[in-house]
Image (cartoon, rainbow, N blue to C red):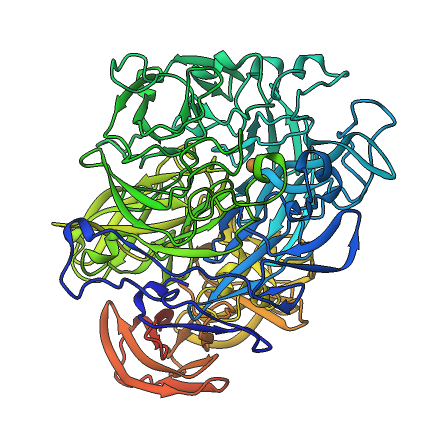
Amino acid sequence: MTDQGQRRRRARVAVAGGLTALVVGGIGASVPAGAQGPAPGGGPGSFTPPFVEPTIAGKPTAEKCVPKEKPEFDRELECKPAAGSLNVLPSGDPFYWDALEGTENVNASIVAEYGRASENDESRLLRFINGLPTWDTPTTPDGGANPDGEPNAKPLIPGTGTTEPGNDGALFCADQNFLADGRILAAGGTAYLNDPGLQDAPVGATELAGVTSTRIYDPSTNSWSQAGRMKQGRWYPTLVTMGDGRMFTASGVEKLIKPIQPDDPKNSGGNVRESEIFDPKTNEWTQNPATADRSLPLFPRLHLLPNGKVFYNAAGQSFNPAGQDYAEAQWNVAATYDPAKQEWKELGVPGLTTGVTSVPGFRGSTSSTMLPLEPDDKGRYTKASFLTAGGVPNPPSPGGYIAVAQSQVATVDTAAGDKLTTEETGPLSQGRWYGSQILLPTGEVVTFSGADRDEVIAPGVEVPRKQAELFDPATKKWRTLASGNNPRTYHNTAALMPDGRVLVGGHAPISTLYGKNVTVAPGVTGPNDGRDPSFEIFSPPYLSRGDRPVIESVASGGETAEGSTPISAGYGKSMQVFVTGDASKIANVTLVRFPTQTHVVDGDQRSVRLRVVKREGGTLTVAMPEDPNVLPPGPYMMFVNRDTPNGPVPSVSTTVFAGTPVPAALAAAAGSKEGLVACASKVGFQSVEARGRGRGLALGFTRVRETPVGVDVFQHAAGRTVVRERLVARFSNRSKGLTWNGRATQPGRTVRDGLYSVRFTTRTASGKREVRRVALRRSNGRWSSRPDFYRRVTCDVLSAFKLERPAFAGRGRKALGISYRLASRAKVRVEILRGGRTVKRLAAKSRPGQRTFRLSLPVRGTRRGDYKVKLTVTRPNGRRLVSTLTSRRL
Ligand SMILES: [Cu+2]
């Protein structure tokens, strides 16, 4: 996952069946530059050639669309989905779905035909295996919403309309964010209506209705399921994750074209005013009271401030010409929503007081990027700054048509009552509508794709913007970068990947002038002959600024995660980041939320600099924020940045789950080639825990599936005597955790002071037994934790590693047994340490996979104390994994 950027190779994908071969040189490659030495600032960056899903309905084809085997309604073609919405999962795998699926079926007019020709958008999982892209289709590719029609989508004239299946729960125009546990919630979307229309005659006008559906994608099963319905139908809403892990949503429309809702006059002629909140514990939505209502543009640019309020940056999409809202003047005003008081407060019009050339107020269809949140000396986060560049601003209300080049930073000071100030920065080199702005780990921002004007008004006449531009926060200026291969205008996307490169994709335009898909002036105007399902990968200039820093491992809460293994970090806790070389060379440690982008919006977009407490040798000690509002629970990429004369250089990232455990399947799959879904079937436990409670133990566990669990407590040592596994307590067939009173359940046994382990046993989906062990010490009747002597099941190269027992030697002078097993051939080095000193080292040896290796540490010459057994496994590709277990010499 994370070392793709390190390798240089030319890769070739041969499509199954051998019909075509797509050369995707450099997808797994790093930077081409370097031969002439670093360019100033790292040069313009570079794009890989485009690459695309090689099949349609399982059959290899180089075409974008092929005729359907069974055409129905007006749907004659089947096409490869474009990334109209793009996410990068915590496994590192991109996951995306289409936009406007089925426009290729339109023969003359999208307005007249699309009510029947449209289809629910399909999603895809994209994986890079050894740098080569492969595609998987999730279960229920379209998310599975509303097979029987969207209940909220009522035709204007009762009794009219058509009822074709498969287009009432489209993912297109939903918004999506990660839940804390790494699943994705997609809320809202589209139901297509022929309104008014007649059932058996394909006549009528296409209307879009916002759906109430919300669905959850689970990466461990590559499947969708349905969550609770929202109270309002929402097309083009924005979702924001709150500090408590709940999800806030606002705006969207129930009907796009002149929203007339006879049963809801308040929302007629406007966007949805009501806001709602989703609780992942119950899977249900609750509508906020009327004090929380506000008229907002579509896909409003909303962000969670570090004080827990939601900031509206006076930006969004005003869907001209048909989607106006009578309250549009209000969109010029920035505001915050306070979830505690459930009310909005206005902060003023951004740009009004700067007295500069920028047009103040509403900025249409611009990205709004929250720049890195930085702590002050005391670790408080009180300033949040937001960069908007380009777009179609006001006036005239509701927004212009030709894109501008203006760029500004709005700052909210939460220590000064959310005071808003605006500062103009250097402009873009040219006007840009719908640029996908991506915040890089270094704090630089790159904008990709888009066009010279608002494509919604007259689709197909816009001129694409292919050249990327970079915003340097040090100079507050933009400079031009390399140009992408493909023009990508409406429904373009981009997302930062864990290796620091950017995946660029999408382009699913509205049919030309609301007619059919044709390109007006090939090579000049946007290609409107259908969608573009391809991707390209951008290597930012920082990959040409010299050697990248390396995170070797991260320690938090008594656990250490090596290499690409994800780790969980609690709020207010300290974390240690071990880097190669000198920690004083590291400028900062940055957490970047995994991206979930659509319509140039990611409501959870966030980058947080951690306070560095100490730098010593190769170790940085950093502090996690105390307040979850700074860093809402969920998945983040941790980067370290090193400064060079040419600018900052980031590491490859390590995955950190803030305030929540690492999902079991992901923990097990780290570093494995087989992927998350295959690995998920091999794990039964999400987590296990044994903690002292009174004179007994609190024994807890969470499981991936509802499989019964056995819990056994064994004694291993009493005083200086090592005993064989002596079972003292047994609890079978458990479905939830328990508290053990500390007394033996086995006849004739007593529980005395000594070293113990708790064994948790369950079965995996494939029926295999899975064992986890936790080591403990009992002293004067009180229990305390001991370091691990038994490694959990994983799908990485080290498939098993355990010590025979948590104690050895003592009066019986028992040697310590060590065993390990590899998934595939690798080099293994074994070191034994006592008190931080190496007492024994076995030279690295190449070992085959699928065989168990045993060795033992003899007692002779050892002294009492904790012995650490450290295994360093180096795979043929050079990636290392280090695992350490501990046993006590008595
Ligand atoms: Cu759209």
Q: Where residue 750 appears, x then y in whole percent? A: 57, 65
Q: Dividing the image into 4 quarters, which one contains the C terminus?
A: bottom left
Please state if 180 lies on the left or on the right of 362 as rendered. right
Identify the residue shown where x is 48% and y is 79%: 823
Is 551 placed above or below 866 here?
above
Left or right of 681, for residue 853? left
- Residue 813's quadrant in the figure? bottom left
Residue occupying the point 49% across, 32% down: 242
Q: Tell me which residue sits at (66%, 16%) in the image.
A: 267
Q: Nearer the viewer, residue 638 or 112?
A: 112
Hey, which quadrant is residue 1 in on the image? bottom left
Q: Residue furthest left?
A: 645
Quadrant where ligand 1 appears? top right
350 on left or right of 18: left
Q: Judge whether 722 appears above or below 435 on screen.
A: below
**Front in this rendered view, residue 570 or 445:** 445
Image mark count = 0
Q: Is residue 469 visible?
A: yes
Image point 64% across, 15% down: which residue? 269
Percent x, y of residue 84: 54, 45
Residue 801 percent coordinates (x, y): 45, 75
* Left or right of 270, for residue 438: left
Q: Is residue 781 visible?
A: no
